[in-house]
Amino acid sequence: MPLDLFRIDERLLHGQVIVGWGMRLHLDFYVIVDDDVAANAWESDLYAAGLPAGVDADFVSVEDAIARFGEFDAHPGRGALLTRVPGPMRELAEAGLLDGKRVNIGGLHAGEERRRVLPYVHLDSRDVSDLEAIAERSGRVTARDLPAAREVPLEELIRAAR
Amino acid sequence: MKPLRQDLMAAWWRTFAVQGSWNYRTMIGGGMAYSMLPLLRRIYAGDPVRFSEAVNRHLGAFNSHPYLAGMAVGALARAELEGESPERVERFRAALRGPLGTVGDRLVWASWRPACLLVAIAAFGLGLGPISSMFLFLALYNVGHIAIRIWGFRRGWQDGLGVSKALHERWLDVVPKLLAPLILLLLGLDAVLLSRQVLDAVAWHGFFAGLALVAAFVTLMAFRWPRRTGRIAVALVLSIPLVWLGLAALNG
């Protein structure tokens, strides 16, 4: 079954994702694309500790994610792919893997250079250019923290970030 | 320097106030730094620069189940003691947020609290007085609550970066699984016991019956127009047990 959710969220696996989206979409597995987390067992073990029984998580580097994308997409269960920041998602998009897919922005915290565009989304110029690049090679990019919240289109976020 | 027993006790005690400066930007960040102060002060004794850097690190956005915040306090302090790099500590903090929230929510909010509440309601339905039933709930609930806090803080301090071992312990999965059917059973039992009491109350007090009817009606409307009637319905539904307890107390 093709992956159901592509999400950019600094918190990676946390309550909003596991309960808010996971229960709603009946997700069986998560693919977390992050070079650092994939390289540190203590870190990936910790993220996986919050998962309910029967739900799996795979922590992979960007390179592995591109190589194994077909395998994730053909997984019999329902899955979501998460990245911490827009960068890795951009690499997936530029590898042509997100054609026609919707990309969800779920949470980017305040940072020194970042401007607040929504209570849960803060962007700097690099985030904006990454997100624009994702939009060019995917279906649609919107921000939405929870399934029931309003979907905010990327154009609106970028206008607020300028 | 390694924190002393009294520093650990002070930090554990402070975690009770971890939500005291809750806000949308850093959530329990302020409470985390406050709880860690006694430990950081000892770890960075004689090094005010690194001490203030450490305090700033722990002031940043953080969230977890409040009862498991102590596990984060212990684990992060252990990481600081072992001289982990600031980047690593930051990443560790970020990774701790998620599981401490979900594990705690599942264990406490979704299992332990409803189970204790339903036991107390059953006791009330079986004839225990309202005040005693309330204290029964508080006593039962807090035994578990304090035990979780002690366990969490200890394991965090023991395991440091390896704290995911503690979060993978079987009982964290087994307890919610065992309590789930028990909660349903108690819910059914309570419904029977309470409906008997409600019928009695209705028989001797028309006002209560009227309120219950209005509440039921508004609640049904709330499903159709949640924005307009949701709050009124919640207020009414919440007021019923209060009115009822009040009437029960009046009538001895």
Image: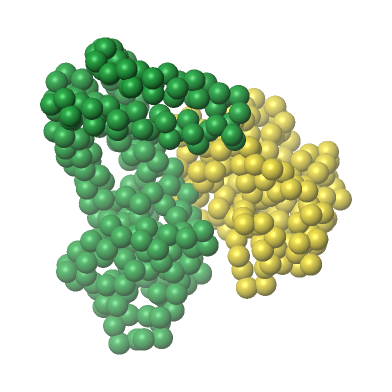
| Residue B139 visible in the snapshot | yes
The foreground one among A68 and B159 is: B159
Q: According to the colouring, which chain is green?
A: B
In the displayed structure, would residue B233 be above or below residue B2? above
| Residue B133 visible in the snapshot | no
Quadrant of the rendering where the C terminus of chain A is positioned: bottom right
Furthest residue toward right: A136
**A7 with respect to B197 (left or right):** right
- Relative image position of residue A161 (x, y in whole percent): 75, 64
The foreground one among A145 and A77 is: A145
Q: How many marks?
A: 0
Q: Quadrant of residue A25?
A: top right
Residue, x 35% and y 18% (percent of image)? B209
Residue, x 33% and y 22% (percent of image)? B207
- Relative image position of residue A41 (x, y in whole percent): 48, 52
Residue, x 22% and y 51% (percent of image)? B150
Q: Quadrant of residue B213?
A: top left
In the displayed structure, would residue B85 be above or below residue B151? below
| Color scheme of the displayed model | by chain
- Relative image position of residue A61 (x, y in whole percent): 64, 52
The foreground one among B97 and A29 is: B97
Q: Quadrant of residue A119?
A: bottom right
- Relative image position of residue A54 (x, y in whole percent): 48, 29
Quadrant of the rendering where the N terminus of chain A is positioned: top right
**B106 with respect to B200 (left or right):** right
The foreground one among A38 and B137 is: B137
Residue, x 45% and y 22% (percent of image)? B214
Q: According to the colouring, which chain is yellow?
A: A
In the displayed structure, would residue B136 be above or below residue B48? above
